[in-house]
Image: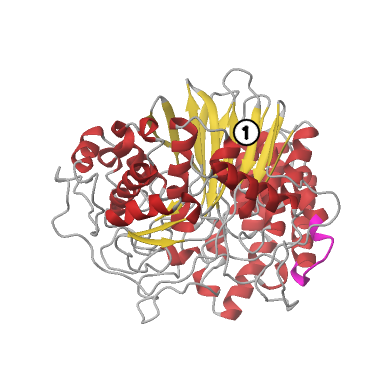
Amino acid sequence: MKSLSCWLGLAVLVCNLGGLAWAQAQKDAPNARPMATKPAGPLVDQWRDSGMKGGVAAGGAEAVEAGLQILREGGNAVDAAVATLLAQSVTDANQFCFGGEVPILIYDAKRKVVEVIAGQGAAPRLATREHFDRPDGIPGSGIEAAAVPAMLDACLTALDRSGTRRFAEVAAPALKLLDRGEYPWHADLARTMRRLVAAEQAVEDRSQGLRRVADTFYRGPIAQEIDAWSRANGGLIRATDLATHVTRVEEPVSLTYHGHEIIKCGPWTQGPALLQALQLLEPFDLAARESNLPDVIHLSVEAIKLAFADRDVYYADPLFEQVPLSTLLSSGYAAMRRNLIDPRHASLEQRPGDPQGGNPLLAEPERRQGLGGPSTDTTTCVVADGDGNVVAATPSGWSGVLAGNTGVWLGSRLQSFNHWKGHPNQIEPGKRPRITLTPTLVLKDGRPRFALSVAGGDLQDQVMLQLLIRLIDFKQAPAQAVTAPRFATQHFLGSFRQPPAQLGSLELNPEFGESTISELRARGHRVKSLKPPVGHPVVIGIDPESRRIEAAGDPLAKRHAAAY
């Protein structure tokens, strides 16, 4: 695409600086916001790599090393992904925490199935709508915003179903990082993790050992310590919430786009909105418009607006709400909604549809909004091995609090609920918030072709859409796709304390060029220039013939990749 060679050159330059600016200044107070580790020792100092036996693309360089180490030692993609995630709770601690969440998509090559590991914790029993019916609503940070921690049990469930290694093996790289003791909480988390390892080592059977790890954290002494700390400090999490936490293994949601099966998690995430946008775009033949950037951007943004309008009205935890997902993803509904896209003019309205009534527009759409709040971001993880196993995960958890002497940071995901009576995504005890975390797998002829993950809150599926267009329609390599200029809109109700939509907004990297920007303004988009990166993407591609694994992450977004 236009300016791509210049963009790639800048990306390589940034990557070759060697990551000297990784660590941010941070006070060493025990309760200070968690920060990333400072890289030390040999590093994966690259943003792209390829190999035949395995590949990892993620955030922190040492987390990528952790995953690659497990692959080299004979572990599979699931083992390596869990090692990467545990290490990222240290290397990427300002974006993801041990007490956070991680939706995971796994292609299991032996069983030839894709499974969703639904690593999102629910609202505690005390987190009622009435509790948050106050002027400040659900807080965006602090002790009351924490959902039940889900990351650890999601990793254990993935290991048990599709992995080959014990917890002690995949936790070893993270413990090595913690033992450097860069921040006071590192020693506490290392002690907690060693208690989990000790619980596993009491039995020889791998599966039983993994369950003992889960029991120690969720139903044993660590749960009791978190309960006591929460009670003493005004928190809502209790031992009962931890003891009854369950990691659901779910069927994915999928849709075919130009011969590729695009696979997402369910409507407790925003993931199906990507499928809606792709279905709206499919007849426009974007491949034929590759040289017409204003058309590609305009059509993509208008599809995103329609898909996210439905997201904001209908998506929620399907265990609690009747989400009309089959209709939202039907070809007939897409055909109705597609007619709302004006090829020459930008929409300046929020326009949810009416899937139950069979109408392209909802007569009386929801107009409420919240106070808003910043998204402190997320991180990324994709892994593939030479046996055909593939993992895409999007780990998160930030702005929370340190759970006493456990060293476990909790996230603030309850802010993705609202407290509006009657809304599908209103907060309720035991309910999962509708989250932005949205990994993606792509299959071609039944075999994995791409694994993708993007950090960036509401930007995640917008960036994912652009990556898929580049990978599938424009036939770009992963390294091209993750480093090309990107765009985004804020034309939706935000997912973090529900800030209002910025109607007609369109933010673009200036590398698109003035002629493209001017044309988009002429179509009515309210354009602003936005410095890169827009979102933090990583991609793994598997060549359908050679089976070579290509791993890449945007170096401007401080992503790393390695393969062998």
Query: From which residue to which does the magenta span run?
Result: 177-185
Indicate the position of residue 221 as horizontal and vertical percent values. 69, 62
| Residue farthest to the top, as pictured | 545
Q: Secondary structure at mark 1?
A: helix
Q: Quadrant of residue 341?
A: top left
Establish if 239 lies above or below 115.
below
- Please give the count of numbered marks on the rendered protein: 1
- Residue nearest the observer in this picture, 533 or 270: 533
Indicate the position of residue 231 as horizontal and vertical percent values. 57, 76
Q: Quadrant of residue 157?
A: top right
Which residue type carries mark 1? Ser
Residue 163 shows up from this direction: no
- Residue nearest the observer in this picture, 248 or 316: 316
Indicate the position of residue 308 as horizontal and vertical percent values. 33, 52
| Residue farthest to the front, as pictured | 515
Residue 508 lies left or right of residue 78; in this view the side is left
Which quadrant is the C terminus positioned in?
top right
**Image colouring:** secondary structure
Establish if 449 lies above or below 398.
above
* Mark 1 closeness class: few <14, some 14–19, many ≥20 residues within 10 Å: many
Q: What residue sits 38% from the left and 64% below the top? A: 427
Residue 231 lies left or right of residue 529; in this view the side is right
Q: What residue sits 43% from the left and 27% below the top? A: 260
- Residue nearest the observer in this picture, 320 or 505: 505
Check residue 98 for magenta coloring. no
Q: Which residue is mark 1?
A: 162
Residue 499 lies left or right of residue 230; in this view the side is left
Residue 260 shows up from this direction: yes
